[in-house]
């Protein structure tokens, strides 16, 4: 079985690969832009471990404190993971309706419009790479290919963490810190990737990236 530190090292290399892959392009997103920092952000156990490992016990306790003090009662609580969604689609099964509204509140880890854990933020926060200022347009502008790349990375991270769970950031930190008072764990089990969600028109273009990912 793979050691915990090896899995975290692989995740770190995956983040670096994503940055490298996206690097030369022009994006509006930057540290301090918080338009998409909502209470609906989700992550896997592996990403929680990454944050805890880098911030240590005190940094983790600070996160839990911020979550407790800035708790949005209404928040996105996923009913299905991305690999679960992909499997259901492949099998022709119904997928559950999901409700997700940015107006439910801001991310509890946001302070004065700046992310308090920016260098170790979850992957879901790294992928809203908009080419326009979404505070003006109301939505992030992403190419179809970028959406495919994002999905593949998210599927891969879930696959790496298929023994772990997935859920809203507030629930994950409260549950994993042993806090039983608020937002009891509403997390769901991660799943292996049985296939990546790549449309036919992107298959050729994404192949080199998939090869690099599998080397990680
Ligand atoms: S973790 Fe940081 S980057 Fe992600 S939504 Fe919260 S404040 Fe924004």
Image (cartoon, helix red, strand yellow):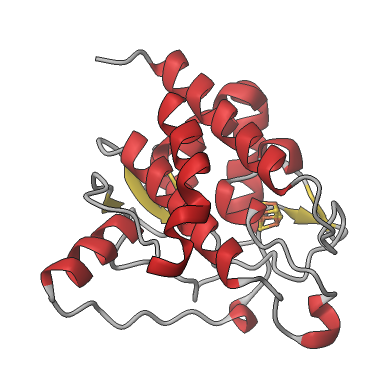
Inspect this view and state whether residue 67 appears.
yes
Q: Give whichever of 104, 180 is nearer the camera.
A: 104
Q: Quadrant of ligand 1?
A: bottom right
**Residue 213 drawn above or below residue 42:** above
Measured from the top left, where is residue 73 in percent x and y?
50, 72
Query: At which x and y percent is residue 193?
Result: 27, 48
- Which residue is depicted at the point 81% across and 47% down? 24
Left or right, 140 with respect to 155, comes to right
**Residue at position x 20%, y 61% in the image:** 87
Determine whether, in the image, residue 155 is placed left or right of residue 32: left
In the picture shown, does residue 189 fall above or below 90? above
- Total numbered badges shown on the rendered structure: 0
Residue 42 visible in the picture: no
Q: In the displayed image of the protein, which residue is found farthest to the front? A: 204
Closest to the observer, 92 or 178: 92
Which of the 4 image quarters holds residue 192?
Answer: top left
Q: Position of residue 199 (x, y in %)?
A: 40, 68
Name the residue at 50% across, 62% down: 148
> In the current view of this chain or complex, which residue is farthest to the bottom?
137
Figure check: 8 above or below 204 = above
Corner quadrant of residue 95? bottom left
Q: x, y (%) of residue 185?
A: 33, 53
- Quadrant of the image for the N terminus? top left
Query: Residue drawn at (32%, 41%), measured in percent from left and top?
Result: 159
């Amino acid at each position: 079985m793979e050691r915990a530190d090896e899995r975290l090292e692989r995740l770190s290399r995956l983040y670096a690969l994503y940055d490298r892959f996206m690097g030369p392009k022009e994006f509006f997103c930057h540290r301090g832009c918080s338009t998409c920092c909502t209470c609906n952000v989700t992550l896997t156990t592996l990403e929680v471990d990454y944050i805890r490992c880098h911030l240590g016990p005190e940094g983790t306790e600070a996160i839990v404190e911020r979550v407790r003090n800035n708790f949005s009662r209404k928040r996105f609580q996923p009913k299905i993971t991305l690999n679960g969604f992909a499997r259901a689609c492949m099998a022709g099964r119904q997928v559950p309706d999901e409700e997700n509204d940015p107006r439910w509140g801001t991310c509890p880890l946001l302070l004065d419009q700046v992310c308090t854990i920016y260098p170790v933020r979850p992957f879901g926060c790294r992928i809203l790479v908009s080419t326009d200022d979404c505070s003006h347009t109301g939505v992030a502008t992403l190419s179809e290919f970028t959406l495919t790349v994002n999905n593949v990375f998210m599927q891969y991270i879930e696959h790496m963490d298929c023994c772990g769970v997935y859920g809203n950031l507030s629930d994950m930190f409260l549950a994993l810190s042993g806090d039983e008072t608020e937002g009891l764990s509403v997390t769901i089990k991660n799943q292996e990737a049985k296939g990546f969600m790549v449309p036919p028109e992107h298959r050729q273009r994404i192949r080199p990236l998939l090869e690099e990912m599998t080397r990680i």
